[in-house]
Image (cartoon, coloured by chain):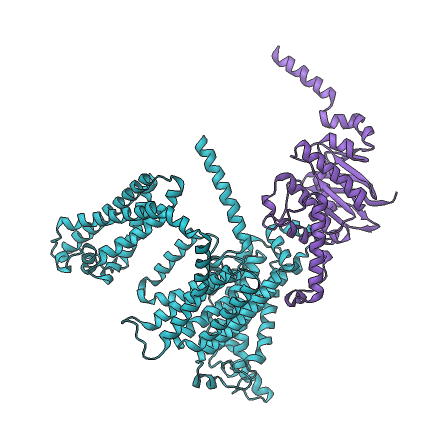
Chain colours: A purple, B cyan
């Protein structure tokens, strides 16, 4: 039970809006953790802080014992964090295999001169990269679709391809931003199974944002809840589900609703 | 507006254009039938699409009739208007200098005198309507009658195979004709043989690329490529000074296009100041080759006790120098624009291109200002002076052409291999989505600077060769238009595709020289060709595979939209 990622007091502000407010978080190696919260709670912003797209205003992010704050996103990827995106952001004009090859970019070492001269070493590396790419596509269930241009893949498969691309960089921690969004129940089932296999077969720690409560409750070992940028609850799925603050965040405070009804009654009378 | 009327209007606009540039007058008495045939060809091309939509031939014939009649009526009205104006002594010539009695008379099939005296029988106008309506019908007939049966005939495997080999053989046949025309004592009617040969040379080179594309990968492609390569290499020896000089500039632009393609086509960084690196390469070679032309370098050399009267370095010794200075230029431009995207990047690079040109113009001490650097030496080879070539088979321009060919081949080789490596993938990824590319592990700064630096190096090479070709270079050789030409040839040829760039250069730098025949309307004709090209093949003449896929999928979307519209 070693801690892989530790977030300590991270705050991110956009002008006057505090998107992420003093959040603490710990993710255990080889665990599956979910991050939930209502829309606009700052979940994706937190992901962006973790992957270097945003730089947190205050706070510390420690990954495998080293700080990530201030690193570029490619350096963070090199350290072993990869991610997918809420609104799919594949390299649309490339084939599925090419997308995964870009994912492996920083694991390839051959020089550009070697590429011009096609040295034996460079060729061997490219071949190996293609092999790995195919294996990764197989792993996520896209075997045989290597040469399809990624925009031409069905929506659910584009999400799978994003996972394969992320795996290309051989991450220790994989951040999935709403992996099951917009999927039908069967595709969702497939994605959940994939998340399990990621952890069990490849030993990848998974940290995911998800709105589908069924997915969250059945898949995660740990759940963290954000609301208005603040962490309001964390713990085992069952405990979080019955936490009154979480229910309040999702359904609105009961008192408020009573008040609203009162007001409406007054308006009518 | 019905589609057929629109087709007629387009045909009318096209024919009017021909009238305005004086084509009927040039053809002479047979102008009307010839124009009708041209129009018929146009209708045929246009109606061919119609038949795919609604297979019924009566419909096609009616469409042809309507389109032809529209064009015919409008042409009759137009020529009536001009004939009346000219007959009543109204001078249109200051505005449209080709609208003269002779031209309109040819269009109407009467003597010029009849126009001047305003005595054109009405029958003549009717005849025009009949001719063009007939051309519409002819086009439609061609579509309806032979379209379907011909297509099934030609799609038989044997015919496809024969057609393929015909296209592959075409460049070799054309090359033979080009060489034959170059033999002494061969007369070609009375026309300008040099221009015809140039056009044939351009077509030969272009058809070679199409032939190569049609070959099957593997041994067949290798064999054809080798033969084509040998054929192209024989060209500088077979052509004369004029054709060689045009082909030389074409391939210098190919070098630039291939370099710019790395920046724009692969990495997706819109660089409008590409001429800067071309200029840097050219001036670097100019300085070491003709130090006596630069007051500053001259005095510097004299202070050092070196004679400034002869070149410091030969072409080949100066080659790495020109490349390195251009590379440095590329990196220096790249660093400040790293964070810029899209339009902003275009504006800043545009400025950079102008800055370099203004430097060359105003840094009189170093660059000799507008007076330019003169007497740049020609490239030799292993001690052979360039004169040695001109005495033999190879003219001095042929030598430049040969060097441009070889350099283009080398650059294309490097560019294609880089594009095929992880660097190429990183470039495309960066072009698609910078943030995601970086988050996927692409080092943005390094990748962008590499694109700028490699692109600039190739431009430097092209610049050096250009300086050697021009012998004297001036700042105005390096205006914004060089950048625009280089960019345009990439777009016309097909962004990201090396064969496309060669075709683009042939079309953009070669064709205008052929079109010198239509003198003052050269640029307009050329522009019209470009517009037509972009309508017919919006992704370029030979688009890269990536772009083609993109087009295909967007076509698919269009089709879906249409279905929705119809059902609603």
Where's residue A261, x and y in %?
67, 16
Taking the view exactly as shown, the residue that stands out farthest to the front is B158
Taking the view exactly as shown, the residue that stands out farthest to the right is A1
Which residue sits at x=65%, y=39%? A156
Q: Is any atom of residue B166 visible in this view?
A: yes
Q: In this view, does A200 lie above or below B525?
A: above
Q: Give the camera-side residue of B461 and B195.
A: B195
Q: Give the camera-side residue of B206 and B421.
A: B206
Which residue sits at x=45%, y=31%? B567
Taking the view exactly as shown, the residue that stands out farthest to the top is A269
- Where, quadrant-wise, is the N terminus of chain A in this rendering? top right
Q: Give the camera-side residue of B185 and A83.
A: B185
Q: Is any atom of residue B22 visible in this view?
A: no
Number of numbered discs on residues: 0
Where's residue B89, x and y in %?
15, 56
- Where, quadrant-wise, is the C terminus of chain A in this rendering? top right
Where's residue B350, x and y in %?
51, 60
Which residue sits at x=44%, y=51%? B155
Is B103 placed left or right of B156 in the picture? left
Instruction: Residue A234: name its quadrant.
Output: top right
Where's residue B53, x and y in %?
40, 40
Which residue sits at x=56%, y=70%? B410
């Amino acid at each position: 039970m070693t801690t892989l990622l530790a977030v300590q007091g991270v705050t991110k502000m956009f002008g006057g809006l505090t998107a992420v407010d003093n959040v603490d978080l710990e993710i255990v190696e080889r665990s599956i953790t979910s991050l939930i919260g209502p829309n606009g709670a700052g979940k994706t912003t937190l992901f962006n802080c973790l992957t270097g797209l945003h730089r947190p205003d205050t706070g510390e992010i420690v990954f495998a014992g080293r700080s990530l704050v201030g690193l570029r996103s490619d350096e963070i990827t090199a350290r072993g964090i990869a991610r997918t995106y809420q609104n799919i952001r594949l390299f649309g004009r490339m084939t599925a295999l090419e997308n995964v090859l870009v994912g492996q970019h920083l694991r390839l070492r051959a020089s550009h001169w070697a590429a011009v001269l096609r040295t034996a070493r460079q060729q061997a590396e490219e071949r190996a990269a293609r092999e790995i790419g195919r294996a990764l596509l197989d792993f996520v269930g896209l075997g045989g679709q290597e040469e399809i241009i990624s925009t031409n893949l069905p929506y659910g498969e584009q999400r799978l391809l994003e996972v394969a691309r992320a795996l290309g960089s051989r991450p220790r921690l994989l951040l999935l931003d709403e992996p099951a969004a917009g999927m039908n129940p069967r595709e969702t089932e497939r994605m959940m199974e994939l998340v399990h296999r990621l952890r069990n077969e490849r030993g990848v720690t998974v940290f995911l944002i998800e709105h589908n409560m069924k997915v969250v409750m059945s898949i995660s070992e740990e759940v963290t809840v954000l609301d208005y940028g603040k962490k309001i609850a964390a713990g085992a799925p069952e405990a979080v589900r019955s936490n009154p603050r979480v229910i309040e965040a999702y359904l609105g405070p009961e008192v408020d609703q009573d008040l609203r009804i009162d007001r409406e009654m007054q308006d009518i009378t | 507006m019905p589609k057929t009327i629109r087709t007629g209007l387009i045909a009318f606009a096209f024919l009017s254009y021909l009238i305005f540039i004086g084509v009927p007058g040039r053809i002479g008495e047979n102008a009307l039938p010839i124009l009708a045939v041209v129009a018929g060809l146009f209708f045929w091309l246009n109606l061919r699409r119609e038949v795919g939509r609604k297979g019924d031939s009566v419909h096609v014939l009616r469409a042809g009739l309507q389109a032809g009649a529209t064009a015919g009526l409008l042409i009759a009205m137009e020529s009536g208007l001009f004939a009346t104006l000219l007959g009543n002594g109204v001078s249109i010539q200051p505005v449209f200098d080709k609208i003269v009695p002779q031209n309109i008379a040819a269009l109407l099939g009467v003597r010029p005198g009849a126009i001047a005296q305003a005595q054109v029988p009405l029958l003549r106008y009717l005849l025009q309507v009949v001719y063009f309506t007939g051309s519409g019908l002819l086009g439609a007939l061609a579509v309806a009658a032979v379209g379907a049966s011909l297509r099934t005939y030609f799609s038989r495997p044997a015919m496809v195979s024969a057609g393929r080999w015909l296209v592959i053989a075409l460049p070799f046949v054309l090359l033979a004709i080009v060489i034959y025309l170059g033999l002494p004592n061969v007369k070609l009617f009375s026309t300008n043989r040099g221009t015809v040969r140039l056009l044939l040379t351009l077509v030969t080179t272009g058809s070679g690329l199409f032939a190569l594309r049609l070959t099957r990968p593997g041994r067949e492609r290798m064999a054809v490529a080798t033969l084509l390569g040998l054929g192209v290499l024989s060209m500088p020896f077979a052509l004369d000074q004029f054709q060689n000089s045009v082909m030389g500039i074409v391939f210098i632009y190919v070098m630039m296009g291939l370099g710019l393609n790395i920046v724009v086509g692969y990495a997706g960084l819109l660089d409008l100041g590409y001429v800067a690196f071309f200029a840097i390469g050219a001036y670097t070679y100019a300085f070491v080759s003709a130090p006596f032309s630069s007051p500053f370098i001259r005095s510097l050399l004299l202070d050092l006790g070196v004679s400034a009267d002869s070149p410091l370095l030969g072409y080949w010794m100066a080659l790495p120098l020109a490349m390195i200075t251009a590379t440095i230029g590329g990196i220096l431009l790249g660093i400040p624009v790293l964070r810029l995207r899209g339009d902003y990047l275009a504006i800043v690079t545009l400025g950079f291109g102008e800055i370099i040109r203004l430097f060359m113009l105003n840094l009189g001490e170093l660059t000799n200002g507008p007076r330019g650097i003169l007497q740049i030496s020609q490239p030799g080879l292993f001690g052979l002076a360039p004169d040695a070539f001109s005495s033999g088979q190879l003219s001095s321009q042929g030598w430049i052409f040969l060097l441009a060919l070889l350099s283009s081949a080398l650059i294309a080789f490097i560019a294609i291999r880089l594009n095929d490596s992880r660097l190429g993938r990183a470039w495309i990824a960066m072009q698609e989505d910078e943030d995601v590319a970086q988050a996927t592990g692409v080092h943005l700064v390094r990748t962008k600077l590499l694109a700028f630096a490699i692109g600039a190096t190739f431009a430097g090479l092209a610049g050096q060769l250009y300086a050697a070709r021009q012998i004297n270079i001036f700042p105005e050789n390096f205006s914004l238009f060089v950048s625009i030409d280089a960019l345009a040839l990439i777009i016309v040829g097909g962004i990201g595709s090396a064969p496309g760039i060669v075709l683009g250069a042939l079309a953009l730098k070669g064709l205008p020289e052929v079109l010198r025949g239509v003198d003052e309307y050269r640029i307009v004709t050329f522009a019209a060709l470009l517009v037509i090209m972009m309508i017919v093949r919006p992704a370029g003449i030979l688009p890269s595979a990536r772009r083609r896929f993109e087009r295909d999928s967007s076509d698919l979307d269009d089709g879906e939209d249409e279905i929705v519209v119809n059902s609603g």
